[in-house]
Amino acid sequence: MSHHLSNLTLKVWRQSGPDNSGHFESYTIDSISDEASFLEMLDVLNETLIGENKEPVTFDHDCREGICGTCSLMINGRAHGPERATTTCQLHMRKFKSGDEIVIEPWRAQAFPIVKDLMVDRSAFDRIIESGGFITAPTGGAPDANLISIPKPVADAAMDAAQCIGCGACVAACPNGAANLFTAAKITHLNVLPQGQAERYKRVEAMVETMDEYFGSCTNHGECEAACPKEISIDVIALMNKDYRAAKFKNRKELSRN
Amino acid sequence: MAVELKSKVPTGPVSDAWESYKADVKLVAPNNKRKFKVIVVGTGLAGASAAASLAELGYQVDAFTFHDSPRRAHSIAAQGGINAAKNYQGDGDSVHRLFYDTIKGGDFRAREGNVHRLAEVSVNIIDQMVAQGVPFAREYGGLLDNRSFGGAQVSRTFYARGQTGQQLLLGAYQQLARQIGLGNVRLFNRTELVDVVTIEGRCAGIVTRDLMTGQVASHAAHAVVLATGGYGNVFFLSTNAMACNVTAAWRAHRKGAYFANPCYTQIHPTCIPQSDETQSKLTLMSESLRNDGRVWVPQNPDDNRSPDQIPEGERDYILERLYPSYGNLAPRDISSRAAKRSVDSGRGVGPLKNGVYLDFSDAIKRLGKPVVEERYGNLFEMYERIAGENPYDVPMRIYPASHYTMGGLWVDYELMTTVPGLYAAGEANFSDHGANRLGASALMQGLADGYFVLPYTIGNYLAPMLNKPIPGADHPAFKEAENAARQRFDAYLDIKGTRSPDWFHRELGKIIWDYCGMERTQQGLEKALSELPALYEEFQKDLRVTGNGESLNQTLEKAGRVDDFFQLGMLMCRDALERNESCGGHFRAEYQTDDGEALRDDENFANVAAWEWTGDPTKSNCHTEALEFNTVHLATRSYK
Ligand SMILES: Cc1cc2nc3c(=O)[nH]c(=O)nc-3n(C[C@H](O)[C@H](O)[C@H](O)COP(=O)(O)OP(=O)(O)OC[C@H]3O[C@@H](n4cnc5c(N)ncnc54)[C@H](O)[C@@H]3O)c2cc1C
Ligand code: FES
């Protein structure tokens, strides 16, 4: 049966626009069901704010199933809050206690400017994909799918990396604001597959260099792996680095041949 | 000014129709394609695949999404899989069988020509997605694996763990991203379509609102594709993502595009039941779970024992009992109603007695926990996070919820709406699923439309327009539409009432769920049609939108969407009221067989109801397109 939590104090980051300065605002939630999700708790807060003729708190969210990667939030200093392998939208109030104080902030990273309140702009991720995160396969010319046989462990490894939801928790958790886990997950997904081989080195070079334009550099803190709601392993970064070094060598050789 | 509903399916055997269409279609030469601008609204599976393919062909493409990135579209949430008539399992599948299953699954309310084409191109989709690097599940030998889904007796569903939609969308998004990187597609993210503009009977472009700045702007094009998803959120509680809405389709409808079969909505049998009053959405548990999970309720309504204490003999495995040949894999509408009836008869389970069990204990005994974990691990985890119970130990509790909408903009064989130059693809159109969609067929349809249909059919419309000028965004019709949009959004802000858009949405959803949900009656629908206009009037008088219209304002965005949902809701009830039969997801209690199955009326209703906007959503005009079944014989759908 559901229980209610009472007397929660929320300290929420409020910022009216990208160029404005922000501040923390305190709100009290008198009572909330422990079956409610964290975002439903914010819905309740927002309904109350609208009732008081105040502007509700802006936050990003959509699927509320942990798959679209739209939700974010630093909750008590942790990306997506306290629960392992769980996005903010999947976090439930049963993980909190009556009387708790909860600090809610946006992702903080140079590459993710704040748009309003708790919403940030993560389009730098899209720039990385646009630079090379694909296999060139125009519509129509594909051979029969079963002509390409892929050993199950390889398909599984690609899938493990491909699960990334692009939420940006890795960047938010990183003291340097690096996007290595995100970029490496995408590169690994494509670079381990037979279909991805033709562009393997071109891809890694383009993506890493685009990443470096926007994001900080990785100094192996490992915070990204701990924060990742999809538990993507930091091993993908090793593969990216290996391929990147090889790319520098191979691509130069290719060029000199032309 | 009624439009004649011509399907444009080529005459002759349905199996030859697509080939014969392609043989006759007008083409635009490669070097001329860049002279045409095509707008694609929506970057889900249908929109991303269409935008990428059209740009590859050489058209100038502008793509729009209200999301921050194309990768967020609701398609990402699809779990279970995608169908294709590959027959890799050698279990008797074929294009014809997929075609037949889809027509039958849709309760004989879809157009044969479109469905056959869908089955034909299904095989190309898998080839295409594999070439793009989608990591579908594989057998140990390295070949693709399949599973089965409701309404089929073959294994034709391809999947990527429980995240098939995610992997397919990422595939399509990557192709789109490539075209954006190459400069062939301009992407307008966080930009919402707020109107469609027609000039001299053709679609001339769209009017958008920049969600970051509130700026309203016009975009002219030779053709416009709406791939803006379904309207399942009219129920407020549904499995759709929070932002899914009907605005694009509805605005097009108000500009002359007929809206077809709005009452065909799908209630999915396996969702996690509502747990409390703050609930904002319902979570789907993939239908694939019914491959190994068994649905049951206690025989005795007063049985309050925990499920493991209830002996076999005192359980009612409802689907296995009622539909022995399909068992737990009976189609969605049928399974949903069976669950509803169990709960209505007081045999519901869980603290609120609002669910039925989906039990894996036999599967775990038979296959071992590792195999079950391999198949469904991430779904089980998701369930545990939400419900707080571990499905390896305690059966899941599930209940039906709004999930998918078969109705949508009426389109012909070319996917063109009744407005020339305006196309609809994916869930936004009505075309392929009749009155009920089979599992794993929406992803297939979205990708079929975007990759393999529109790239052919759009050229047929554009070719004759070569080198002819089109109205620009400075045309008075655009200015007029811009002003109307600005006024509409200002008006929401000016009401200054007392209730939030969400409050109205919840109330609207309750009415639609109660009277136009899983079971409908004449009396209920009439009641809804008297309550809805009253609530809508209250919305127009008592809405409160805080903030302003010149910067990001989620409450204002929501107000516009709820407004359109109200109007759609009224049309849905009208449609449900006038369709005096039961078929698929439209179950009218007055029309059922002795054992409670849907009773169709083929004499009077073997047709598509396509509604024309008249200015008042309760007074729309109904036009019909007769459905002809030349290949499949109309039969009573039986899954016994
Ligand atoms: C939880 C869940 C699980 C599912 N599982 C399966 C499954 O296993 N197999 C299957 O086949 N189907 C499944 N479905 C159904 C399937 O996912 C959808 O029908 C399909 O993905 C819809 O794709 P689409 O491209 O038509 O629309 P969507 O993916 O919904 O995309 C709509 C796009 O339009 C944009 N948009 C909408 N309105 C506007 C506007 N006014 N202005 C600008 N942009 C706009 C959005 O930003 C988005 O980009 C599932 C659905 C749900 C809810
Ligand atoms: S809202 Fe989609 S992942 Fe959280």
Image (spheres, helix red, strand yellow):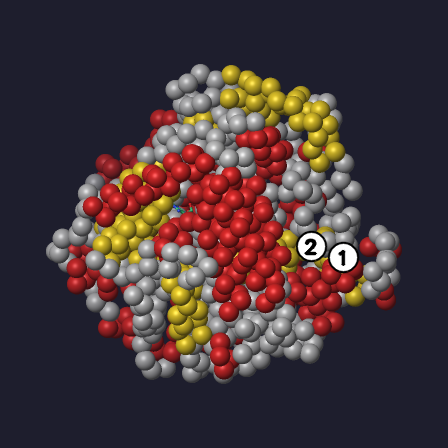
Q: Nearer the viewer, mark 2 or mark 1?
A: 1
Q: Are marks 2 and 1 on the same chain?
A: yes
Q: Which type of secondary structure does the marked residue at label 2 adopt?
A: strand
Query: As drawn, is B506 to the left or to the right of B568?
Result: right
- Density class for disc 2 (Cα within 10 Å; few <14, some 14-19, many ≥20) is many
Spatial CA span between label 2 and label 1? 10 Å
- Residue B211 visible in image: yes
Please give the chain letter of the residue carrying mark 2. B
First of labels 2, 1 by sequence position: 1
Q: Residue furthest left?
A: B467
Q: Is residue B34 above or below residue B432?
A: above
Residue B88 visible, this orientation: no
Q: Residue at x 69, y 78 (%)?
A: B594
Residue A27 in the image: state x and y as whole percent. 61, 22
For image coordinates 57% across by 50% down, the residue present is B509
Query: Residue B638 placed where, x, y %?
Result: 61, 77
> Looking at the picture, which amino acid does disc 2 mark?
Ile
In the image, residue B246 lies at what x, y percent? 44, 51
The residue under label 2 is B398
Residue B327's place in the image compared with B420, above or below, is: below
Amino acid at dot 1: Gly
Residue pointed to by mark 1: B348
Q: Are marks 2 and 1 in contact (CB under 8 Å)?
A: no
Residue at 29% across / 66% down in the picture? B1
- Residue B64 sits in quarter: top left
